[in-house]
Structure formats: structure tokens, C-alpha cells
Image (tube, rainbow, N blue to C red):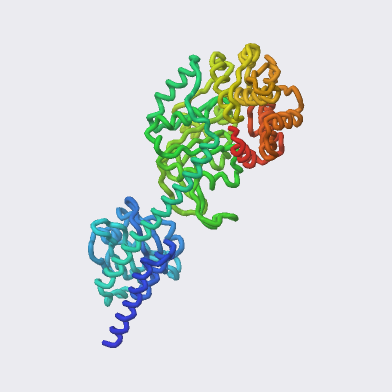
Amino acid sequence: MTTRRAMKESRSLAVLLEVATDLTAALSTEARYRRLVEAVRKVFPCDAASLLRLEGDELVPMATAGLADETMKRRFSPARNPRLDAILRSRYPVRFPADDPRPDPFDGLLAGAGKKTTEVHACMGCSLRVDADLVGALTIDALSPGAFDDVDDAELALFAALAAAALRTAGLIDSLSGLAEKRGLVAETMVEETLRSHGGEILGESPAIQSLRQEILVVAASDLPVLILGETGTGKELVARSLHALSSRSKQPLVQVNCAALPEAIAESELFGHVKGAFTGAVANRAGKFEIADGGTLLLDEVGELPLSIQSKLLRALQSGEIQRVGHDRMLKVDVRVLGATNRDLTRKVKEGRFRPDLFHRLSVFPIHVAPLRDRREDIPLLARHFLDRALVKLGLRNAVFSPAAQRLLQAYDWPGNVRELEHVVLRGLLRAASTRPAGTQAVVEPTHLGLTETASLAPAVPAHQEGSMVAVALGLDLHSAVDLFKKDYLLRTLDANAGRWTDVASTLHLDRGNLYRLRARLGLT
């Protein structure tokens, strides 16, 4: 008998040493937890063991052995499971007699037990604590009553102490890894935002712009969702950046998603993230835009283009602050303020059944309308001069002016592409003026350089391929820069011909929308 006890103690010590060694080993979180519950089954005469972490008011399985796979998808509330409640309340191991009337939370879940059974079985458990903090519970179950009569409480308590340390260690590692991943993704996102962002304030002194600024001030400090409405090119992104900059979240990231550039197949992963193996090509866990924006603001640009299949998941995120990575069985809590922007008539899309009415109402708690440029013509001179100054910097030129005739033409044009079209026209006008000016003289932008009429949209004076080459040679560009200049000019012409709609540009040029979006970002087009 003494020899048998000595052998058992020796085996227990060996297993305990394995568990202690695992605390400092380079293991994944899942492997660390799995090895711990397997070690418990080696030492104790149990049919099942579980390691549960306390998350809020619920116990969440981190690893199980001898239990059905569905156990890992469940959450156990101590308030509804009196045995778990008793375990958590005690600082010492708790064993339940065979005739204990309290139901066992794992009844019917033991692997190999056949159909769900209510057969009484042996049950023990111990709360997991780190210092004074309650972090979880360790449980063991057996189908045979009396299976744990010879189990030493102190031995289970020792395993519980190591399990608590494992939870804390894995939690710290996960937190550090998650923080590092988020910081890296935030940095990547901020670089993208910097490339496409113009920065600066909303320019103009028209009544429409003054009213817009007032609306932004009213809602910016709140956490209300805002739906920014307006035609293509009116400056909805700038409104979103202003809302973020004036909010309490300004020190956290502003993350932007172009919903129109998301293929339906990857839209869910892009927004909510995925786990390794969730689908072909998912070679690693990846956070979605909601996780990256946690604590900050998420701008859903062209939100009206989201597929209906994604809209329901977006609604849940807005209602509860919970998201779920593709392929993951747990919900994640996020704290994100959502801004939507669209040039579509969402009310009409709701009537047509192409946009969820509940999502529309949730997004449009505070709608902001951005007026088209034709309704605030008094702002055109200020905007045109601003864009001319920026174009000078881009092209490395010193100075340029608009002729009086060019100013009148800018004022008279209807601007179907709004502020964005004005920017593009000014840039191209300066390129043409710079390519034809005498050496050493100031560039003067004339009506012919703008390529506008009072009623017609942009009509180039010369074919694009001839003009692009002419300007590139005049500015002394290398081949790579000249090709980029041609691409930018050609995209801008196509954009203007399609009334500022990038989705139509992709269709016209037979380009994948995602590829077009990346090309726009590389060329500095918004």
C-alpha cells in the first residue's frame, strides 16, 4: 500500500513539474491550457476535467478533457449553476456528495456518456485565485459515485494554484500580443489615412458651410452614430475627420473602411476579423477594423454599398458593442463610435429592400447633410486658390495665378463632381499652364487650361496620351513618374466623365474595385 502511494505521489510530482515548466515554455495559449487539463486527468481518477476563466459574470471554458466538443461553445453563469457558484465562493476545494440535489453543469456533456444523462456522478472543484483576484475555476467529474473519496484536497488545491498562474500568464501574453497586433494594425491604418487625408479645416464662409460647422460642433462631443450625407466629392471624409478630432476619442485611431471596395466574400473578415483556418487563405488570426478602432472612431465610407448579409452583423455591433471574428465561437466587446457616409438615397434603398430599415435608423441618429458646391458658389474662389497652392507644392513649382477669365469660368461651372472635381480641374489646369509657359515666367491658368465650359463637363483640349506626354517632358519627369502622372490624369478624366463615382470608374475601366482603391491610394487620389 505504501509502495502504491509512493508511486502515485511520484507520478503526481512529475506531472506537477510538467505543468510548472509549461508556465515558462513558448506555448500557444490553447496548448498551455490543453496540457494543463490533460495533466489533471493523469493525476486524478476523473472522466472529465475543465478549466474555466471568469469573464464578467460568466465562466468561459478555456480547455476541457473528456467533455463533448459543444462544451467549449458554452458560457456558464454561476447564478444559474449552484455548484459552480459554491466553487467560486470557497477558497478551498469543494466536493459534492453523491446525493447532492444541486445539478452538475456538465451533466449530459461527458464524452462517452451516451445521450444526455442525469446520472449522479462524483464532482469536485476549486476556485482559481491570483492574490485576492478570482480568475476562474478548475473542475473534475466522474461517472462513478465515490470516485474522488481518496483524492487529497491539498493536491487539487496545488493544481488549482498552478492553473490560476497559467491563466494569469496566458492572459498577460495574450494582452501583450493583442496590444502589439493592434498597435501594428493601427499604425498601418494611420499611414493609409495619412496618404489619403488632406487634413486641415473645412474651407468656406457660405451659409451652408457655417451651418455645417455648427452641426459638427453640436454632435462631435457625443458618442452618437452620425450619418454623413452628400453627393460624391462634397467632402464627407473631411466632415468625419472633423467629428473625430473634436470628440473625446481624438487621441485614439480614426479607422476608415471603403465599403464599396470590399468584395462580399471578404467584407465580414475585413470588418470583424478572422481566426486561423476560418477559410482558404486565413493563415493567421487577424483583427478586423472594429477591433483596430476599439476606443476610437470607425468611418464606414459608402456604407450604402454593404451587402445585406453583413448589415445584420453591423447592426449587432452597433446595438450591443459585440463582434465575432469569422471562424470564432466567442463574442468580443468593442468600444467604437461609428460614422457612416454615403452619396446614395438610403431611404429609397430601404423601400427597395436593399438596406435594412433597423440599421438605417441606428446609423442615422444624427444625420448631417453636406451641400453640393453649386449651392455654395461663394466658396469657389477660396477653394480654388487653396487647391492651386497645394498643386504648386505637389509639382515643385513656385507660383501661379488664375486669369480673370479662368476665375469667371470656375464660378460659372456647375461642378457635378463637387469639390473633388474642382481640385482635379485645378491640378490639371496648372499642369497645362506649367507645360506651356515661357521659361522663368509665372504660370497663369487660363480657361483653355481648365478644359471647362459653363454647361459641359470636362473636355480635354488635346487627347490624354498626347497631353500627358507633353506635360511630363515639360516638367522633366523620369519614366516612372511620367507613367504615374498619366495614370493619375487618366483616372481623373474617367472620374469626371462618370460624375465623380469611383464604382462606375471601376466598371468603365474593367478594374476590380479593390485594385482601383489601392491604385487611388498610391497615386494620392481621394
Would you identify the image quadrant in which residue 428 lies? top right
Query: Looking at the image, is 183 positioned above or below residue 485?
Result: below
Q: Is residue 458 visible?
A: yes
Tell me: 215 left or right of 415.
left
Q: Which is more toward the observer, 414 or 77?
A: 414
Name the spot of residue 467 as percent of width and height, x first: 73, 28
Which quadrant holds the C terminus? Answer: top right
Name the spot of residue 166 as percent of width and height, x first: 35, 63
Residue depicted at x 54% and y 42%: 310
Q: Which is more toward the observer, 112 or 22?
A: 22
Name the spot of residue 160 as percent of width and height, x first: 30, 66
Which quadrant holds the N terminus? Answer: bottom left
What is the count of numbered marks? 0
Residue depicted at x 44% and y 68%: 111
Tell me: 439 left or right of 60.
right
Residue depicted at x 64% and y 34%: 503
Residue depicted at x 69% and y 18%: 452
Name the spot of residue 210 as percent of width and height, x first: 46, 17
Q: Which is more toward the observer, 114 or 20?
A: 20
Would you identify the image quadrant in which residue 234 lies? top right
Query: Looking at the image, is 216 positioned above or below residue 308?
Result: above
